[in-house]
Image (spheres, helix red, strand yellow):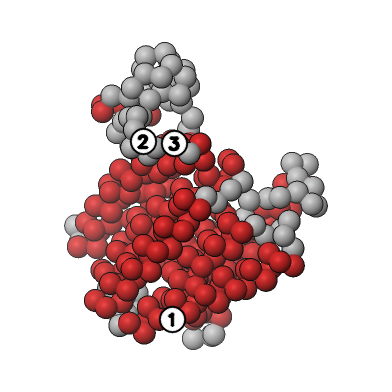
Amino acid sequence: MTDSTFTAALAALVGAAFGSFANVAVYRVPRRESLVRPRSRCPSCGAQIAARDNVPVVSWLLLRGRCRRCRAPISARYPAVEALTALLFALVALRLPSEGGGSRWDLLPYLPLMLVLVILSFIDLEHRVLPNRIVLPAIAVEIALFAVAAWRGPGLDAWVRGVEAGGAAFAFFMVLALISPRGMGMGDVKLSALLGLALGYLGWGRLLVGFFLAFVLGALVGLALIARGRAGMKSHVPFGPSLALGAVIGVLYGGPIVERWLGR
């Protein structure tokens, strides 16, 4: 097993564990509940979930998606969140250190970013909100983490570029929100600052790729919902997941996409 494969496998295990925390956050943050207490419980009977039934993905499969005590069904969202977080952690561990100018220190800001994006995406899909309780602390923490990564890796110029890109993205999305408040929420505006920081740190080209893909994905999702009769022309469609997916693609594969666009 190569070092990169081992790192990716380890990152996947860590990601699955943090995926369990993501599930707690997705359920509790919109309800303004504590993320620490009480311990995880069955939403149907209230029974505390034992450690053996709290192993990411595996426990859900062994229990066939049901509570051990009351046999009530447990949503497939739980293993989906855990598996998705594990996959994103593995991809970050594989892709970023191997790219030109990348270093293992880049994992410091980008792994937590993936966790935050998973949490925000599932909350936005269910509740159509991007909570300040997550977005604002994430921006502050990521600014600090990117500073450390830049200092140990490509240099502080990358951090300055990321901060500038975050500010530019925030300003651009703010203008869009003022022009079309029904089409762009303030949660999207704040999230754009976080994503601009993450994409801009890797280069201005990544910023363009990430946000361009986000708008394309958002338009496709909106058209699909309209075609299926699940939304109208004036309906509010959650844009957070599209922003998150566009940013993830920009972070992981933006370099080759930019090179293809430039014909290199």
Residue at horizontal 67 percent and vertical 71 percent from the top: 175
Three-letter amino acid code of the residue under disc 3: Glu
Residue that badge 3 annotates? 33
Residue at horizontal 29 percent and vertical 64 percent from the top: 108
Q: Which percent across, then down, holds residue 41?
A: 38, 25
Q: Which percent across, then down, holds residue 170?
A: 56, 70
Three-letter amino acid code of the residue under disc 1: Arg
Q: Is residue 55 visible?
A: yes
Q: Is residue 208 above or below residue 117?
A: below
Of 137 and 245, which appears nearest the observer?
Answer: 137
Indicate the quadrant where residue 211 lies: bottom right
Residue neighbourhood size for the residue with mark 2, other residues' Cα within 10 Å, grouped as few (<14), some (14–19), many (≥20): many
Three-letter amino acid code of the residue under disc 2: Val
Disc on the earlier residue, 2 or 1: 2
Q: Secondary structure at mark 3?
A: loop
Q: Is residue 264 left or right of residue 231?
A: left
Q: Secondary structure at mark 1?
A: helix
Residue that badge 1 annotates? 161
Disc on the earlier residue, 3 or 2: 3
Q: Secondary structure at mark 2?
A: loop
Q: Which mark is residue 57?
A: 2
Q: Which mark is residue 103?
A: none
